[in-house]
Amino acid sequence: MTGAALQLHGVTKLYRSGRRFFGGVPVSAVDGVSLSIAPGETLGIVGESGSGKSTLGRIAAGIEAPSAGEVLFDGRQYARPGSTAWRKERRFVQLVFQNPADALDPRIRVREQVAGALAAHERLPPAERRRRVEDILHRVGLAEIAGRVPQQLSGGQLQRAVIARALVLQPRLLVCDEAVSALDVSVQAQVINLLMSLRTAFGLSLVFITHDLSVARHISDRIAVMRAGRIVETGDPDTLFSTPREDYTKRLVAAIPAMRHAPPVRPAAAERIAL
Ligand SMILES: Nc1ncnc2c1ncn2[C@@H]1O[C@H](COP(=O)(O)OP(=O)(O)O)[C@@H](O)[C@H]1O
Ligand SMILES: [Mg+2]
């Protein structure tokens, strides 16, 4: 047993290129990555498109196995993806992706989708199940509108529903892959603030993947910068921004529009900025 919630040792993922031009030569999407995440810690993973962030996120969450290297969650390896043991451990590790509409069933009311996720993972007396569902719906701010189907919700509300469905299981680790990237900036700030309060309430470890450094800066305790499958630099957000060591990181920081160097605005101030 170790202190870390999640440890990756020399993780590599090879994909066989589909393109004839490469003659089926394996491409390493992730190349020898080692890192650890403490209980309750938020690790931001940033890097340009194609740098391997999503692949690393899927491996960290255990939905994809590495080609080489080791992933330990609470000191133990994940079970083989798809196995019975693996389905059981899914409760403890949840993922949130970019497009919430794709993640939800369009025909089913939000409350039922959250309740269904809980029922699939835990046997609970009906009253207790209802209590857990209402509690999380309340925490994400959807209690009043959870009787609606996805089509009747905004993008931000849909992502809140996805977050509720993940957190009703009381996971230990949440992997967010571009979870706010499709939302308007003011809505991004709301969802990030929500995630920050939920992670404290639940003692969650968070892997927060984003191409947007200003978003990563706001939410992360520590940031890992990925380039071509490797982590080129890690550090606490303020140091990384003020004194990036690698040229690649300097370029990423320089690419942020000036206004967004500041942390995302709190919801109350959002409207003022928009004027
Ligand atoms: N399932 C896959 N099959 C083949 N190649 C893949 C697959 N997933 C990712 N890749 C390749 O691995 C590299 C990293 O992709 P990805 O992890 O999606 O990066 P990012 O999330 O940073 O944009 C890219 O070159 C991508 O084309
Ligand atoms: Mg990606």
Image: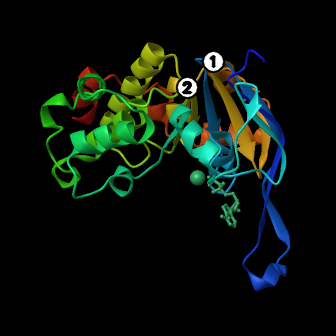
Q: CA distance from mark 2 to mark 1?
A: 8 Å
Please state which amino acid type lies under the numbered disc 1. Pro
- Colouring method of the image: rainbow
Q: Is residue 207 shown left or right of residue 269?
A: right
Question: Which element carries disc 1, helix, strand or loop?
Answer: loop
Label 2 crowding class (10 Å Cα cut-off): few <14, some 14-19, many 20+?
Answer: many
127 relative to 63, above or below:
above
Q: Which residue, given by chain and number where applicable, does mark 2 sit on? A: 172
Question: Which element carries disc 2, helix, strand or loop?
Answer: loop
State the mark number for residue 39. 1
Along the line of sight, the residue nearer the viewer: 205 or 185 = 205
Please state which amino acid type lies under the numbered disc 2. Arg
**Quarter occupied by the C terminus:** top left
What residue appears at the point 46 percent right and 33 percent down from the top-left corner?
A: 260
Residue 188 rendering spot, x and y as whole percentages: 37, 36
Look at the numbered discs 2 and 1 and tell me whether their residues touch, using CB distance below 8 Å: yes
Whether residue 209 can be seen here: no
Residue 166 rendering spot, x and y as whole percentages: 42, 36
